[in-house]
Image: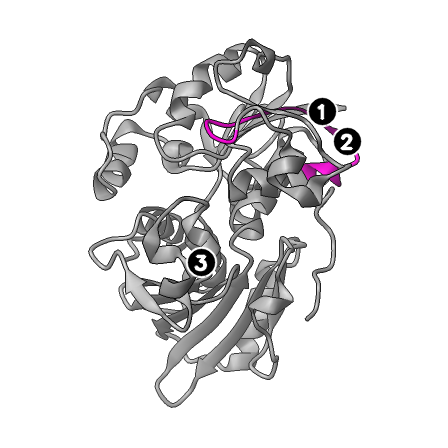
Amino acid sequence: MIRAKVIGAGGYGGVGIVELLLGHPGVEIACLVSATDTGMPASKLYPHLTGFCDLPILAPGDPAAQVKVDVVFTSTPDAVGMKYAPEILASGAKLVDYSGDFRFNTPAAYAEYATRIGLDPKHASPDLLPEAVYGLAELHRSEINTSRRVVGNPGCFAVSCILGLSPALKHHLVDPFSVICDCKSGVSGAGKKPNAAFHYPARYENMNAYKLAGHQHVCEIERELSLQAGQEVRVTFTAQVVPVCRGIMSCLYGQLIKDVKAAEVVALYREFYKDSAFVRVFDRSAAIGTIHVRGTNFCNLVVDVDERTRKLRVISHIDNLMKGQAGSALQNMNLLFGLPETTGLMRVGMYP
């Protein structure tokens, strides 16, 4: 059995990976750690775990938290996982980090990201950056293997945009400077933290755009799409929060530079993702929404061509707490340990 530790177990990302690990046939949860909610069983903090996970939530410095494990999930804010990483790797464990700490392979690339979000541009463990791999399995499956020790889990908006646009950029269907990412997220994307802007009265019947000066996920979106295109890609990205609990819908556009029909692009997308169990491609007739991926690791893509304006249009749907977070983390863990990437993840959602 793979023994797992979750650091940041008190938050949405932490409880999300706990829920998934409980259903994984090859994993035992050995330890839960959090800077908050310490001293109580996980099932007291999250009563739905009663009888499934009653482990105590330990403080980071608790000696009881120093247990031998095979993998650690750091569901922590930026600049936290990088501080734990050397100790985790020295213990022989592998690391899947949820933040932006290991999404970039050089100190310069990390510094660009950190500066964008107002963090110290100096990485605490720069020697580990070259061996980290970006954890979007659909594009980096062969790189996320048993020889790897560090995976930087992708951002939620980034997952929806990169999966939605990669086939088009790879096949040079659109102008790489014409791409628009119009993205809407549920309130859970803000995490579990006290903030009056995300209390029910402030969110009910309210929608708004935010971080117009520059969203942190733009760096990874542009890098990954540029890798696919083989040339620089620049995107116009708008993040919005809408009054639902979970889910991301990204409406993605690009100016076509090839004369293609909608059916041809749908076929191209299906070929691109033929070996990716969690990406499902639909044509314009599909009545698809975020409810159809809720609680799952799937990304549903509606692919279309607006022939009147010669625009590519892709509508990408994910569950921000699953494919956008805990689901991708477990998918990455499976690859790190040589397991089928669908293990513990191939489950249907709930409807309605």
Marked residue nearer the N-terminal end (2 or 3): 2
Nearest to the eye among marks 2 and 3: give it: 3
Please give the name of the residue rendered at 51% of the width and 20% of the height, measured from the top-left corner. 59
Label for residue 26? 2
Number of the label disc, if any, that sits on residue 187: 3
Of the pair 351 and 140, the residue shown nearer to us: 351
Helix, strand or loop under label 2: loop
- Is residue 27 magenta-colored? yes
Kindly tell me whether residue 206 is visible in this rendering. yes
Using residue 197 as the reference point, say whether residue 318 is left or right of it.
right
Q: Which residues are magenta?
A: 20-37
Tell me residue 51's x, y (percent).
Answer: 78, 36
Badge 1 is on which residue? 2
**Circle 2/circle 3 CB separation < 8 Å:** no
In what element is the residue under mark 1? strand
Outermost residue toward the bottom? 308
Mark 2 neighbour density, 10 Å: few (under 14) some (14–19) many (20 or more): some
Q: Position of residue 29 (x, y in %)?
A: 69, 27
Q: Residue sitting at 61 percent across and 80 percent down?
A: 287
- From this view, report whether residue 286 is shown above or below residue 150: below
Give the answer, above or below, for where 184 lies relative to 153.
below
